[in-house]
Amino acid sequence: MIALFSLLAALLLSLPSAAFTLADGRECQSLGGQWHYIVDPMDTGIYKYHMTLQKPSKRYFADRHFYSDKTTLIEYDFDKAPTLSVPGDWNSQCDRLYFYEGSVWYKTTVPFQRIPGRRWFLYFGAVNYQCMVGLNNTILGTHKGGFTPFWFEVTDVLKEGENSLIVWVNNTRGVSEVPTINYDWWNYGGITRDVLLVSVPEVFIRDYRLRFDGSVVDVEVALDGGSGSVSLEIPELKIIKKACAGKDGVAHFRFKASPGRWSPENPRLYDVVIGTASDRITDRVGFRTIKVDGERLLLNDKPLFLKGVALHDETIGLNPGRCRSEEDARALLEAARDLGCNFLRLAHYPHSEEMVRLAERMGFLLWEEIPCYWNIDWTSEETYANAENQLMEMLGRDINRAAVIIWSMANETPCTPERLSFLGKLIAKTREVDPTRLVSAALQKEKPDFYHPVVEDELIGLTDIISFNQYYGWYDGKPADCDKITWSIPSGKPIVISEFGGGALYGNHGSDTELFTEEYLELLYRKNLSMLAKIPGLSGLCPWCLKDFRSPKRPLTGIQDDFNRKGLIDEQGRRKQAFYVMRDYYSSVRF
Ligand code: GCB
C-alpha cells in the first residue's frame, strides 16, 4: 500500500486550487447512468503479483482489462462485468457489497465531439473515499475526501468518438484519514455524486465570490485562461457594472445596494449574471447578514432562534443509501419543514450541492461541517492538509449560499493541545477565506459532577458560538434526571445545543422507563426540552437527529438492525411520538 499512497500523495499536488462554480449557463453533460464495475479486494489492478511495493503503472488503465507487464488479466473484463448506478453508493445497490470496504473499479464510455475554441473539464461531485481517475489510458489525477467536488481538465486527453473513463475508488478507512477509522455512520463507498463533462470557452468564468455586509456588495470574479472585461448584472436591482480582470484573471466589483433580505420567512434569491466576451453564467443569490451580538444571534440585524435538526445525507426508504437526487434531498427537507425547523445541521460531512441549494430555496439556515469527528490524527501534517483541503473544497463550493451561516470544524473532539492547535489552524484558515460567517465546532460537556455539568473547552475562545452535544436521559442517566441538572457554561456567546436525543424503534410501544420504546423517547424529549430551555443565552437547538440512519456500530437485533435509532422519523419516514413533542416546542418558540 505504501507505494500506492505515495503515488497518490504526489498526484494530489496536480489538483487545481481555485473553486469551479457550477452555475446556470455552464454546458454540462451528465455522465451518470450504468457503469461497469469490478470489485477488487486485492487491488490486482494496482499491484503486480510479486510486488506490492511496485508503483502502479498507467497501463492498468487500458481499455477493457487490467494488464500485468505484457499479460492481459483476462479474468478482469469490464465489458462482461455487472453495472452500478452512478451516482450512487455501492453498499445499497448490491447485497454482496453491503459491508464492503475496499477497491472497486468503474468504467464507462464518454462520447465526444470536439468544438473548436472550447475546453472540457471532468467534474466529480463526490467520490468516497479516494480515487484515481484515468481517461484513455492517461491518469488524470487522484482525490481524497469523500464528500467534496473535484475536477480535471481533459481538453487534450479527450478524443473524437468514444473515450474510456476508468475510476478506481477505495473506501478503506485509515487511522490518519479524515474521518478516521471509528465513526457512527455508514461508510458508503463509490461515485456517490454526479459526474459531469463541463464544456467552457477558452477564457471562462471559473468562479466568483459575492459578499454583502448590509449595504455594500463585494464581488470577485476569477477568469481562467485570460483576462479582459467582465460584466456583472443584478437585473432586479437594476445593477449593471463593468470591471477589468488583470493579469491575475481577477475582476473586483464594489457597490452599494439595498436588496430584499434572504431569510427563512422570505428566502428571496436574485439572478446574478456574470459575463465576459465569450462566457456568461447566471446564479441565484440571496442577500443577508449574520452576526453575533453578545449572547444573541442576529439575522439581518434581528434576533434569531435556531429551530434546528441534524441529519445525515441518507435517503428515506426501506433500503437507504446516499442521496442521489434533488428528490431525495427534498424528502428530507420536507420532513424537517414539517417539524417546524428553520435550521439544519448537515452532519457530519459536506452534503451535496443539490441539498444545499434546495435548502436555500426552501428557507433553511445551514450549518455545514467537515468530518473531523471524534479522535483523528491531530499530529499528522498529512491529516491536517487533508482536513484543510476538504474544508476549502466545501467553502469553495458553497461560499455564495446565503443559507449557510455556520462553518463547523469538528464534532466531539478531545480537549488536547494537539487538537486545539489543529482546529485553531482550521479556524484561522476559514476566517481568512470567509470572514463573513460564524465558525463553530460541536463540543462536549465535561462531567466532574453528574448533576452539575460543565462546558469547558479552550476552543470556545476561538469560535463565534458555543455548541455542544449532550445526552442526558440516554448515555447519561434517565430522562427524569434532567429535572435536577444545573449547567455551567461560559457566558458571552450564543449557545446552540448541537445534539441531544435518544433511541426508539418506530412502533415499539411500552413503558416510558423501557429503552427503545417510543414512550421513553417522548419522555426524554420532554425532559430535555424543559432542562435546555432554562439555559441563559440559548439561541438554538439541534436534536439528534431527523431520521434513523444506517450505522455498523448499531447491530442490536430486532431493534437496531444496523440503524442508529435516534431519528425523530424512522428510515421509512414514519414519525415517532417524540417528533410531535419537538414540533410543538418549535411552534411555541416566538422570535
Ligand atoms: C454523538 C455523535 C453522533 C452519534 C450520536 C449517537 O454524539 O456526534 O454522530 O451518532 O452521538 O447516536 O451516539
Image: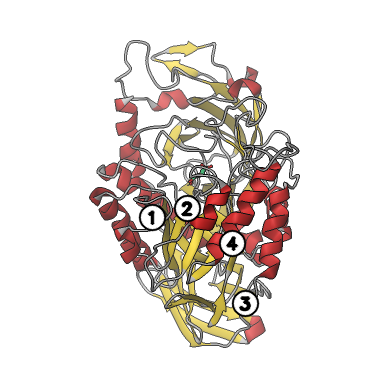
Q: Are marks 1 and 2 in contact (CB under 8 Å)?
A: no
Decide: few, some or many residues near mark 3? Use Cα within 10 Å; few <14, some 14-19, many ≥20.
few
Q: In the image, residue 235 lies at what x, y percent?
A: 65, 81
114 or 465: nearer the viewer = 465
Label placed on residue 591? 3
Distance (Cα) linking label 1 and label 4: 47 Å
Q: In the image, residue 155 lies at what x, y percent?
A: 49, 47
Residue indicated by mark 1 = 17
Callout 3 amino acid: Phe
Q: Are marks 4 and 3 in contact (CB under 8 Å)?
A: no
Distance (Cα) linking label 4 and label 3: 18 Å
Residue 285 occupies which quadrant of the picture? bottom right
Callout 1 amino acid: Ser
Q: Earlier in the sequence, mark 4 or mark 3?
A: 4
Question: What kind of element bears circle 3?
Answer: loop
Callout 2 amino acid: Asn
**Can you tell which of label 3 and label 1 is closer to the viewer?**
3
Distance (Cα) linking label 3 and label 2: 24 Å
Would residue 519 appear left or right of 190 to someone viewing this image? right
Q: Earlier in the sequence, mark 4 or mark 2?
A: 2
Decide: few, some or many residues near mark 1? Use Cα within 10 Å; few <14, some 14-19, many ≥20.
few
Residue indicated by mark 4 = 530
Decide: few, some or many residues near mark 4? Use Cα within 10 Å; few <14, some 14-19, many ≥20.
few
Q: Earlier in the sequence, mark 3 or mark 2?
A: 2
Residue indicated by mark 2 = 469
Decide if ligand 1 comes within 8 Å of the CB at mark 2.
yes
266 or 277: nearer the viewer = 266
Callout 4 amino acid: Ser
Distance (Cα) linking label 3 and label 1: 41 Å
Quadrant (top left, top right, bottom left, bottom right) of the N terminus: top left
